[in-house]
Image: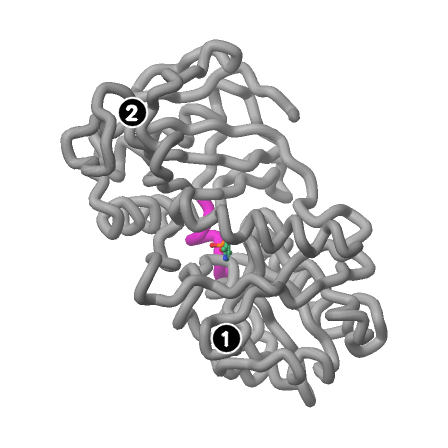
Amino acid sequence: MNEAKYIWMDGEFVEWKDAKVHILTHTLHYGNGIFEGTKAYRTHDGRCAIFRLDEHTKRLYNSAKMLLLDIPFSIEEMKKAQVELLQKNELFNGAYIRPLVYLGYGVMGIYHKKCPVNASIAAWEWGAYLGEEGMKNGVRVKISSFNKPSNNSTMGKAKASANYLNSQMAKFEAVEAGYDEALLKDTDGYIAEASGECLFIIRDGVVITPPNDNSLESITQATVIELAKDLGYEVVRKRVTREEIYIADEAFFTGTAAEVTPIRDVDSRIIGCGSRGPITEKLQSAYFDVVQGKNEKYTKYLTYIN
Ligand code: PMP
């Protein structure tokens, strides 16, 4: 991994190698932690900006509220810490930013409200999540044998560490079977999301993406919906079944780390041309224009760090 110099821990900048926790850290045992994945990009004018810092930080606080974690810092403090961390690490060519809020050391047992809440932020350079080749030619996807847990059992809208156990199992299953990524259905059999991305399909020029009935409220999905509308496409949010994906003209993933990644086949059914489709390419390029500050309309989403 691309180590940086410092990690922010509870208000202090700690050297990367010293950013450690006790083995009895509550979250390590019982899984109640929440995190964010935010990205900063080098902009076209040679500066660097964090993309949608406000929305990611707000979602961190929303996740904390859902899981009864009282973050001992204000939203403003957490935003400032993310900016300062990139500056201190001189990550001016862009970085992935990982705030994590976790239950710390001092109390064991499942009841968690007496446990101290700790916050940390790490940032490092991280390339294309699903690979450079995938960004260009598309990735191979398997519909998972793992479902998203029902809305009655876990809180899928929280970006909770515990939710990623299910994602991890689905991802492993897909990779072992020779695919790049897994798509998970909800308990009604509709596609909810991938292990760490949202799904879009294109049929007859219409851009379709599932609602967030049983998935994270994705910030990249919301951005791509805006961009698709700007480009004049009809955007429909509706539940989709696996066979609708098989016969789609194009399909792609969105996510902070995955950005806009084309899908070239699903369960060995070739999607469209079997590579990056034309609408996907337009949306991918529009997305990179936005994060790199080339689209005036969306500079409102950028927090420049230099
Ligand atoms: N679903 C899951 C399960 C994810 O982990 C992610 C990545 N954060 C997404 C969707 C996409 O969300 P976002 O666009 O906000 O990164």
Q: Residue at x 48, y 80 (%)?
A: 237
Type of amino acid at the residue the image marks with label 2: Gly
* Residue labelled with disc 2: 104
Q: Distance from label 2 to label 1 (Cα)?
A: 36 Å
Residue 240 screen position, x and y as percent? 55, 81
The verdict on residue 250 being magenta is: no
- Residue 18 visible in rendering: yes
* Magenta segment: 297-302
Q: Nearer the viewer, residue 172 or 130?
A: 172
Quarter of image, res 287: bottom right
Farthest left residue?
Answer: 114
Q: Nearer the viewer, residue 234 or 112?
A: 112
Along the polypeptide, which appears first: circle 2 or circle 1?
Answer: 2
Type of amino acid at the residue the image marks with label 1: Pro
Residue 210 is tagged as: 1
Residue 274 screen position, x and y as percent? 84, 71
Magenta part, dominant SS: helix
Residue 274 in the figure: left or right of residue 122? right
The residue at label 2 has a CB less than 8 Å from ligand 1: no
Q: Is residue 204 above or below residue 137?
A: below
Q: Is residue 261 above or below residue 278?
A: above
Q: State the SS at label 2.
A: loop
- Residue 293 visible in rendering: no
